[in-house]
Amino acid sequence: MTVDQADRIEREIAESRVGVWRRFREQPFTGRFLRNRTAVCALGYLVLLVLVAVFAPWIAPHDPDAQNLGDAFADPFSAGHLLGADNLGRDVLSRLIVADRVALSATALALGVALLVGVPPGLVAGYFGGWVDRVVMRISDAVQSLPPLIIAIALIGALGPGLRNSMLALGFIFAPNFIRIVRAAVLEVREETFVEASRSIGTPTLRIMVFRIIPNTLPPILVQISLVAGFSLIAEAGLSLLGLGVQPPSASWGSMLGDGYNFLFQQPWLVVFPGVAIALAVLALNIVGDGLRDAIGRGR
Amino acid sequence: MTRLVGKRLLAVVPVMLIVSLLSFALVALVPGDAAATLGGPSATVEQIAAIRANLGLDEPIVTRYLGWLGHAVTGDLGRSLFSDQPVLGAIGERLPVTLTLAVGALVVAVVLGLPAGLFAALNRGRWQDRTISAGAAGSLSVPNYFVGMVLIIVVSVSFGWLPATGYTAFAADPAEWFRHLVLPCIALGLVPAAVLARQLRGALVGVLAQDYMRTAEAKGLRGDQVLLKHALKNAAIAPITAVGTQFALVLGGSVVVEQVFGISGLGALVITAVQQRDIPLIQGIVIVAAVLVQVVNIAVDLSYGWLNPRVRVA
Amino acid sequence: MTASPTTHDAVSDATTVRPVLEVRGLFVEIDTGDQRAAVLSDVGFSIAPGETLGLVGESGSGKTMTAKAIMGLLPRLTARVTGGEIVLDGVDLLGLSTKQLREIRGDTVAMIFQEPMTSLNPAFTVGDQIAETVRRHRGVSKKAAWARTVEVLSDVGIAAAERRSRSYPHEFSGGMRQRVMIAMALCCEPALLIADEPTTALDVTVQAQVLDLIRHMREALGMAMLFVTHDLGVIADVSDRVVVMYAGQVVEQSGVLDLFRRPAHPYTEALLNSMPGVEAGPRGTLLSIPGQPPAAGDFPVGCRFHQRCGYAAEECTTAGIPLTVVGAQETRCLLHTDLPSRPPLVDLVPEDEIVPEVLLDAEPREPR
């Protein structure tokens, strides 16, 4: 490699390093997304959920675990309990607020695992191609061809129940989604870079590619994150409902559904509120995901 | 066409091999001494030894895998750690119920999603289209188990129209069988219905703008011939693929929905297995689920050959 | 075919026999999103049994819109007929329900389209697509429908029709697909065939064959034909009489020989001058028409052609121009009436110079 080429590469790296965030922000899709009013509202709701999760202990009107049998099965809007109380007289609103924290941290954990397990193989498969690519893709095909919830439950069977284990399992199952997206983005960038490199500087270095890939991959990854987050939220609640996720006395929206289900005849509201909470959060995630996808202007 | 089938069947082999590795690896994921952990704190030395023997934990891992795989291929998925019942037999008892639910859910998906998708495509851009799109987005966001609970509250508890829980075999009483199936199938079928409606709408909007649709109109065909024959066959690939993908999700979703409706199918079995940490049974369920999904995927792929004549030549 | 003396004067012929198709005062509007724009204004013409009427104009002139209106194939959500009559075989099509219209389409009137590559449904065999038309309108058995299918496919020159009827569209070339489309249109022996630019999308070598086929089939079945095209050379080849459209209006109606010899409207003259086959325009050069045709909703007041017309005078820009009879021709131009300041258009064009080569080797048409 000549000094010239090395120079050029260094310059390009320096340039792209500064530009990652700016390039992302200036992509036309950001503006298109912000013009979608429904999606922005949904994003606002998600931000609200995050704020509630962060400040949960200060926001909750009651101690979420405090039992008061006198208030058991209190109706919504009754004195002291805006959304009523459960079979042990615990305040439903306070439990929903604390469960928001559980739901978000569980989702974040699942997403983190999925990104950690998914992004590196995607990068490798896209960059090297050949048999590495084939092996990686075969494995993700196989994982994706399995019913997600059953695999999650099977993994929990081996690892033992608990929120952390079930989120690890979910993260593992959603990893292939990210493998695919990262691989596709790398392939695209690799084509461009190779074409350019063959004209000027020889083989592109991995470093250049990484700095080019990040802004290019971010939008589709964001779409995938919002959709996977919605699915993890539903799955987490389902697993907790089955008693495989959150363990008592912790509250999660799913375990609240499960508890409330036992008293479906006495107090139907006990399942309605956590159910609506899940549905609203997932709806917001889906709307944001659709908004991002429309803003990118491909896929679908 | 025969070559297409052959090629497709061959592609199953590596996928199933990886699935077998994954499910075999479940034992390795068990923390600590697998036999002791699986037996639980109250297990006797003999019980732990029995578990060890069942899982073949004393043999080298490769021998163990090959032996396990050899048995699995012949349909021997081992024995339950608890009941000592053959795994395949235990699954076989529960599978029909779950399959009935899954198929019922897909029927619901088609009954709701097909007309919704057609109607939205025919009125694209108008309020009918927007209403259906919003309805689909909503359905995709509500977890099936919550739908099930709401259905129980409204339909069973408030109105008493249909039974809330339980299952009756078809052979015992077809009418009761149907009455017990309606609510769980709706709960499970709402998401696939929404996916189907979206995909069908998207595909149809494209197809309706095609020149051959104008030709079909110019020939004076009846409205239903134009739509159901000429448009639907061309628009079918994306929605059929979607339904195929949804089958795996419905199969998984039935685990929770079965629990909500008190139905003892595969879902109830897998939950018991997990609570008892009955690894061979869990492995068996994973394998059976994977086989089912593969069968559906093959059927979907082969339908392409019928829908799109160009695929057949390839 | 009845024996009749060779004459270019089809206009008078059409008045003696009841026409197959009569379009009177047709108005069509489209919804462009922010406004409703008139795309057809007072379009009228008729076609006698066995006659071929050429419908000429640039894209956007409304010629395809007219064909679609006759077929009842206007875009359902955006286009609307706001006035007029389309009388086919004595029945006003505009008064029919969709259901009744579907009985007629493909049976009494059939259509061939411009895009043979995409006009056939890729998911069904060509035989199936023809047979379903036969069954729909003839109500015959599957077997009989299939026999008719094979018959009509070999009529349009498809070899081994029996075997080819079981092939899918992607197994045919463009020219062959257009033959299939012709077979499909003719399988129920319509009284009127509408051909919308049927050869435009084809290779030049195939164009002539397909044109020959259309002409041959029209003669064999003795049907009337509305031939829509922008190509005057093709018009000279197939039509008995020509309607020229511009900006949603009929601007000239002439027998085919008159049209080439004595264009009665400046727009027709300009079209003739821009024909590649005509080496010498009046001034010895190949002329193209300056400017763009106006878009629907944007038609100028007065004569819609005046902005691009070399003869335009003050009088042309104020009020709409009526269609007036000049001999055997009709034209929407003031040059023939009260424009004393300029010599009449017909005198501008010496007869020997305007006859295009393509017309010279065309056989004389026989209007029936």
Image (cartoon, coloured by chain):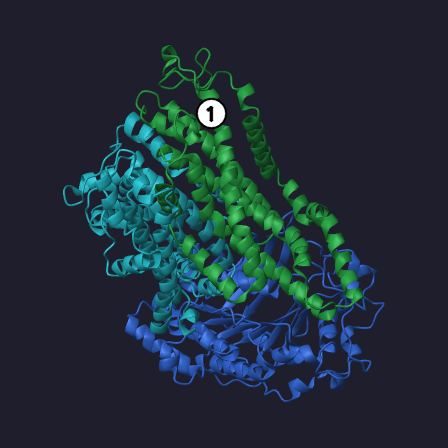
**Chain C shade:** blue
Indicate the position of residue B18 as horizontal and vertical percent values.
39, 58
- Tell me which amino acid carries mark 1: Leu
Which residue is drawn at the image coordinates 61% and 79% (left, top)? C234
Looking at the image, which residue sits at the far left?
Answer: B172
Indicate the position of residue B246 as horizontal and vertical percent values.
39, 50
Which residue is drawn at the image coordinates 34% and 56% (left, top)? B61
Res A114 seen here? yes
Q: Which residue is mark 1?
A: A96
Instruction: Answer above or below: position of B192 versus B159.
Output: below
Question: Chain in cyan?
Answer: B
Question: Chain in green?
Answer: A
Instruction: Answer above or below: position of B172 versus C130.
Output: above
Could you tell whether A134 is left or right of B243 in the image?
Answer: right
User: Does dot 1 land on a helix, a strand or a loop?
Assistant: helix
Between C178 and A139, the one nearer to me in the picture: A139
Which residue is drawn at the image coordinates 53% and 70% (left, top)? C113
Considering the image in quadrants, where does the N terminus of chain A appear? bottom right
Indicate the position of residue C135 as horizontal and vertical percent values.
34, 68
Between B208 and B249, the one nearer to me in the picture: B249
Looking at the image, which residue sits at the far bottom?
Answer: C361
Looking at the image, which residue sits at the far right?
Answer: C341
Between A106 and A259, the one nearer to me in the picture: A106
Residues packed near mark 1 inside 10 Å, few (<14), some (14 to 19) or many (20 plus): many
Instruction: Answer above or below: position of C175 versus B137.
Output: below
Res C263 seen here? no
Could you tell whether C321 is left or right of A161 in the image?
Answer: right
Which residue is drawn at the image coordinates 49% and 41% (left, top)? A110
